[in-house]
Image (cartoon, rainbow, N blue to C red):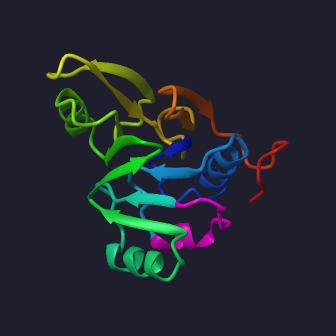
Amino acid sequence: MKIGIVSDSHDDIPRLTAALEAAVAAGAEAVLHCGDVVAAVTLARVPQLPVPLHVIHGNNTGDIYALGRLAGRSNGRIVYHGIEAALELGGRRVFMVHYPRYARALATTGDWDVVCCGHNHKVTVEPIRNVKGGTSLYVNAGTTAGIDAPPTWVLGDLGSLTFEIHDVPHPGERGAPGP
C-alpha cells in the first residue's frame, strides 16, 4: 500500500491541491496530513480525492469544531483525528503527530513502523533505532506550503517501507492544478 504524506499546508489551497493530486497520481491509497491545515475551508476547497484524507491538527489549529463538522459531512473522504492518530494501514502501524520531538520519541518505542510529523518545515525520512532492537521510520513531510523551505510531500510504500521526498509542483505547471 502506498500513502502520501503532507504537512503544514497553512491554507495554501493551490499547493495542497497539487500535492494531493500528485500523491494520488503516484498510486497513494490514502493521504495523511500531519497538521497545520489551519482553516477547515481549505479542505473544503480542495478537489475530492478518490482515497481517504487523514488529518490531525497542529499548533495553527484554526477552527477545529468546523474541521470536525466538515469531516463528519464528507462521507469518509476526510477523517479528522484531532491532535494525533494511530492508524493501521497496509498491515503497518502508523502514528501521526504534529511535533517532531514527540514523533522521534514515539519512534524509539518500537510500537510503530512509521511515525509521521511536520511542524518545523524540515523534510526528513530517517530510520530510528528503537528499544525493541529494530528500527522505526521517522517521516517529516516538511511544508507543503513552502514556508521558509521548498514545498514538499512524501510518498511511502508501506510494503517495502521505502519513502521518497517529492517537490510540490507549482500551480499552473504541467501536471499541477491551476489557481
Could you say where residue 121 lies in the image, as x and y percent from the top left? 41, 36
Q: Quadrant of residue 101?
A: top left
Q: Residue at x 34, y 42 (%)?
A: 93
In the image shown, does 146 or 28 lie closer to the viewer?
A: 28
Could you say where residue 7 lies in the image, as x and y percent from the top left? 45, 46
Residue 121 visible in the displayed image: yes
Q: Residue at x 18, y 32 (%)?
A: 105
Q: Which residues are magenta?
A: 40-52
Q: Quadrant of residue 48?
A: bottom right
In the picture, which quadrant includes the C terminus? bottom right
Could you say where residue 169 lies in the image, as x and y percent from the top left? 71, 40
Up-down: is 139 above or below 85?
Answer: above
Q: Residue at x 52, y 73 (%)?
A: 41
Up-down: is 166 above or below 96?
Answer: above
Could you say where residue 19 lies in the image, as x and y percent from the top left? 63, 47
Residue 118 visible in the displayed image: no
In the image shown, does 92 or 57 lie closer to the viewer?
A: 92
In the picture, which quadrant includes the N terminus? top right
